[in-house]
Image: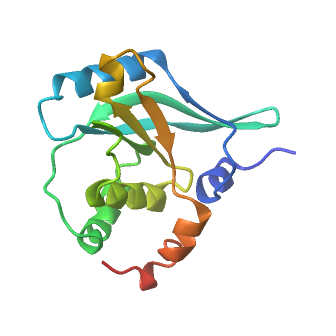
């Protein structure tokens, strides 16, 4: 019983693993370390949703630094979304750097919402600079919960508010 690839993109599934390819991880860490003097470093995560036997894995193969766009409201970002969708990229989420686990800012949550609108199984990878400096695991992976999706009306564009 094989699922259609389009169904996997449009349907939210339980992910068994998020696999971060080594070159992608090293590029992300390098970008986060170089920009550690800034408030936060952001970028995009590129990859595919892959089904292997009975497991659904999110395979991250590339990370790209963010273009440094200005902060805008959610409605403005959603209005600009159709232009971005025409690029045909395989963007599956975002990465950010933070200090002391302070990753959940308004801007980052808006970015998670936009990622969800483009790809239902999107993730946010957080790189904690302070944990890295003392030898702890600096990586964490998050995604929007089903309750958050229902509460924010993310499946109904007409009900989304600022």
Quadrant placement of the N terminus = top right
Q: Position of residue 43 (x, y in %)?
A: 29, 38
The vertical placement of 119 against 128, above or below, is: below
Q: How many marks?
A: 0
**Residue 24 relative to residue 102: left or right:** right
Q: Quadrant of the C terminus?
A: bottom left
Residue 46: x and y, percent?
43, 36
Between residues 153 and 118, which one lies in front from this camera angle? 153
In the drawing, does residue 75 fall left or right of residue 52?
left
Q: Residue at x 23, y 71 (%)?
A: 76
Instruction: Classify 63 as above or below 70.
Output: above
The relative height of residue 142 versus residue 150 in the rendered view (above or below) is: above
Q: Residue at x 17, y 22 (%)?
A: 34
Q: Position of residue 48 (x, y in %)?
A: 55, 37
- The structure residue drawn at horizontal position 33% and vertical position 61%, both measured from the top left corner, is 110
Q: Is residue 62 above or below residue 105?
A: above
Question: Does residue 77 appear left or right of residue 47 in this picture?
Answer: left
Colour option used: rainbow
Residue 139: give x, y in percent of width and height. Answer: 44, 29
Where on the picture, by quarter, is residue 31?
top left
Q: Which residue sits furthest bottom? A: 158
Judged from this view, the residue extending furthest toward the right is: 1
Quarter-of-image position of residue 115: bottom left
User: Residue shown at 32%/53% (left/top)?
Assistant: 108
Q: Which residue is at the front of the view, 3 or 64?
A: 64
Of 37 and 21, the residue lying toward us: 37
């Amino acid at each position: 019983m094989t699922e259609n690839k389009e169904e996997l993109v449009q349907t939210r599934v339980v992910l068994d693993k998020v696999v971060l390819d080594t070159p992608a991880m090293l590029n992300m860490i390098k970008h986060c370390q170089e920009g550690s003097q800034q408030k936060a470093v952001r970028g995009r995560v590129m990859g595919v949703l892959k089904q292997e036997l009975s497991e659904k894995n999110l395979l991250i193969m590339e990370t790209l630094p963010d273009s440094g766009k200005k902060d805008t409201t959610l409605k403005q970002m959603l209005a600009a979304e159709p232009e971005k969708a025409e690029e045909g990229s395989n963007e599956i989420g975002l990465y950010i750097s933070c200090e002391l686990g302070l990753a959940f800012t308004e801007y980052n949550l808006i970015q998670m919402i936009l990622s969800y609108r483009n790809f239902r199984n999107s993730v946010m990878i957080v790189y904690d600079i302070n944990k890295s400096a003392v030898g702890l695991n600096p990586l964490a992976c998050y995604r929007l919960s089903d309750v958050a999706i229902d509460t924010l009306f993310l499946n109904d564009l007409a009900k989304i508010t600022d």
